[in-house]
């Protein structure tokens, strides 16, 4: 099957980004942009594409929800034995990409991921809905499974087991914090002459800022 999508195109005209709107600290701009994505009802504003690299050097991405930004680190939760979890265990290099189409904006982050402490993962795990806590216990994320029926049977069995008790977080489920070394803000502009600003972390913990060609 061939597809010709050459005429599917759109001009980006909503707003611009200039050097005098750029704070020294990229987290301030990230907070502002994420806040606008939430208040302007972008669909899934906290969804980000998480990129990891396999031991063989193959990149892969999947969508994950950002849950917190703490101490200048981006936090998400997942299964440590999933495909991404195995990649991170071998190579903590990671990328996070937010695309807010409604705002004609994207943010690309590169850095290194580290598992969160069990105490912090416990705290978040127990804040999740009951059924999500059960789901995290019974789903061998990224592994082949025989059927949906088998998954549902495990779910029902596990739910009955924990009835009326606090559910234990499984050791293979928890959070990662991502410490960024590079953050790029992209604002779509007419004629593909977009605004791009790149922050790169310097040795003294300050950020070098450059405008990039679109
Ligand atoms: C909108 C959206 C949000 C998601 N949020 C998460 C999440 O927070 N954690 C997670 O482990 N998977 C999440 N997923 C599922 C992942 O995209 C992915 O299927 C799963 O983590 C397994 O990825 P892996 O096999 O590459 O490790 C989400 C998917 C979508 C579409």
Image (cartoon, helix red, strand yellow):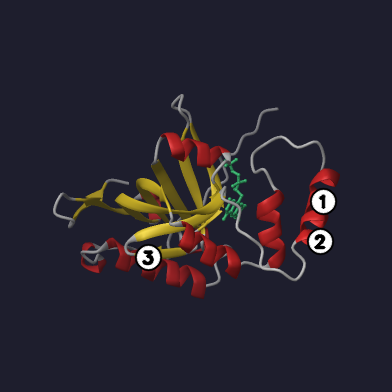
Mark 1 element type: helix
Give whichever of discs 3 and 1 has the lower sequence position. Answer: 3
Q: CA distance from mark 3 to mark 1?
A: 35 Å
| Residue that mark 3 sits on | 70
Q: Quickly name the residue at label 2.
A: 160
Q: Residue at x 75, y 37 (%)?
A: 145
What x and y, as percent, mark residue 95? 41, 45
Can see residue 15?
Answer: no
Quadrant in the picture for the N terminus: top right
Please tell me whether residue 19 is drawn above or below residue 61 in the rendered image: below
Q: Are marks 3 and 1 in contact (CB under 8 Å)?
A: no
Q: Are marks 2 and 3 in contact (CB under 8 Å)?
A: no
Residue at the location (59% across, 39% down)?
5
The residue singled out by tag 1 in the image is 152
Q: Please, which residue is most extreme toward the bottom here?
A: 39
Q: Is residue 145 above or below residue 157?
A: above
Left or right: where 214 falls relative to 40: left
Q: Is residue 27 visible?
A: yes
Mark 1 packing: few (<14 Cα in 10 Å), some, or many (20+)?
some
């Amino acid at each position: 099957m061939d597809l010709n999508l050459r005429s599917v195109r759109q001009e980006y005209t909503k707003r611009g980004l200039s050097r005098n709107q750029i704070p020294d600290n990229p987290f301030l701009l990230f907070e502002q942009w994420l806040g606008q994505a939430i208040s302007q009802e972008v669909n899934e504003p906290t969804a980000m594409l998480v990129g990891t690299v396999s031991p063989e050097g193959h990149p892969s991405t999947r969508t994950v929800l950002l849950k917190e930004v703490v101490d200048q680190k981006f936090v998400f939760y997942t299964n440590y034995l999933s495909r991404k979890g195995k990649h991170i265990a071998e190579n903590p290099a990671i990328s996070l990409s937010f695309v807010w189409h409604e705002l004609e904006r994207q943010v690309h982050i590169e850095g290194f991921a580290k598992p969160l402490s069990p105490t912090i993962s416990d705290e978040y795990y127990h804040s999740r809905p009951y059924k999500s806590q059960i789901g995290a216990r019974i789903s061998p994320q990224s592994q082949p499974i025989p059927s949906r029926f088998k998954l549902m049977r495990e779910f029902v069995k596990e739910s009955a087991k924990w009835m009326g008790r606090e559910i234990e977080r499984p050791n293979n489920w928890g959070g990662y914090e991502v410490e960024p070394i590079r953050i790029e803000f992209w604002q779509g502009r007419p004629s593909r002459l977009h605004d791009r600003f790149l922050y790169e972390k310097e040795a003294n913990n300050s950020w070098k800022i450059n405008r990039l060609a679109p």
